[in-house]
Amino acid sequence: MAVILSTESVAPTDRLAYWHDAVWKTFVPLDVTASKDQPFSGSVATERLGHLRISTVDADGERVRRSRSLIAESADEYLLLGLQTRGTGVVVQDGRTAVLGPGEFALYDTTRPYTLDFPDRFETVVFQLPRRAPGLSESDLRHITGVTIGADQGLAALLVPFLSRLAAEAGTYRPEVGDMLARNAGDLLATVVIERLGRGTTRTDAAQQSLLLRIRTFIDAHLADPALSPEAIAAAHHISVRHLQRLFQAEGATVGGWIRRRRLEECRRELGRPRRARPTVAAVAHRWGFVSPAHFSRAFRAAYGMSPREWQAPADETGA
């Protein structure tokens, strides 16, 4: 369910102060000033998908600033993606300036100072994720901020529609699906960044990486199907099994190993819930595509060094 903070019911003289607090609570400590001398109007609606927080901001013109002193007040480290959907936005960080129109986005990092300027009424969707979630290097994180990226540029043509759909439908996904989608968003974002920074990525490389991301998304959506196999995955993507295997080999993995890893991760997540909210070990294994409970137990122990029931014990103690 979305958390909505709005100035609508606030007295006009108190609105900017209320908005300052709303922005602070939604993101990180920030200074907010209005662009015009008039009663301020704004709302922010926030949904969560796994580790990804999605906030739609609709407000009058404003200037938002994160200074070094404000950074010192918060230990939280986030990477934010601001997708402009109406009006104009300007992102300034690390000596670069990104001017954004509808359909364009920029990244900014809460561990370093930045400024956001919106001269007039605007709407933007902000995707906030832990700074390390996409797996980008420190160098990449410092070179990609304050850069305008449009939906018509390379793999951003895949990312922008995907993020827009997440924002529109965030409240409709089951928690386990939300977790998967958050990971997929981080993976695709990392690929867009690598492509944008031009780290030797050819058009063919980018196409193969895009295909691999689509395949991983397909696998996540079909983990519960015991019949999920390299043959079924290859057929669904109109490629040969050999081509599919090469895609995963380039990542140091195998198709079967990836499926097993993802199933085990989802089982471990469910088994870590408090007892009241958790199904049986057998039910969890079946839910995520394991036909044999004995095979599941062996695979779980091999991956995590303990049996599923041993993994449950700490959750039982904390959730009792």
Image (tube, helix red, strand yellow):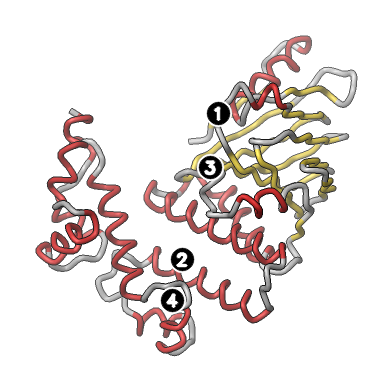
Q: Position of residue 318 (x, y in %)?
A: 22, 30
**Viewer-proximal residue among 172 and 315:** 315
Instruction: Measure how far apart labels 3 and 2 are at the Cα level.
Output: 21 Å
Q: Earlier in the sequence, mark 1 or mark 2?
A: 1
- Residue at the extreme front: 139
Q: Nearer the viewer, mark 1 or mark 2?
A: 1
Q: Position of residue 153 (x, y in %)?
A: 75, 66
Kind of residue at disc 1: Ala
Instruction: Measure how far apart labels 4 and 3 are at the Cα level.
Output: 26 Å
| Left or right of residue 274, residue 14 in this image | right
Q: Are marks 4 and 1 in contact (CB under 8 Å)?
A: no
Judge whether 122 appears above or below 186 on screen.
above
Q: Are marks 1 and 2 in contact (CB under 8 Å)?
A: no
Q: Are marks 1 and 3 in contact (CB under 8 Å)?
A: no
Q: Position of residue 151 (x, y in %)?
A: 73, 61
Numbered badge on residue 248: 4
Q: Are marks 3 and 2 in contact (CB under 8 Å)?
A: no
Label 1 secondary element: loop
Q: Nearer the viewer, mark 4 or mark 1?
A: 1
Q: Which residue is mark 1?
A: 75
Instruction: Measure how far apart labels 1 and 3 are at the Cα level.
Output: 12 Å
| Residue 191, picture quadrant | bottom right
Q: Earlier in the sequence, mark 2 or mark 4?
A: 2
Label 4 secondary element: helix
Residue at figure coordinates x 48%, y 54% from the top left: 183
Numbered badge on residue 130: 3
Q: Nearer the viewer, mark 2 or mark 4?
A: 4
Numbered badge on residue 217: 2
Crowd class of label 2 (few under 14; some 14 to 19; many from 20; radius 10 Å): some
- Residue at the extreme left: 294
Q: Earlier in the sequence, mark 3 or mark 2?
A: 3
- Residue at the extreme right: 37
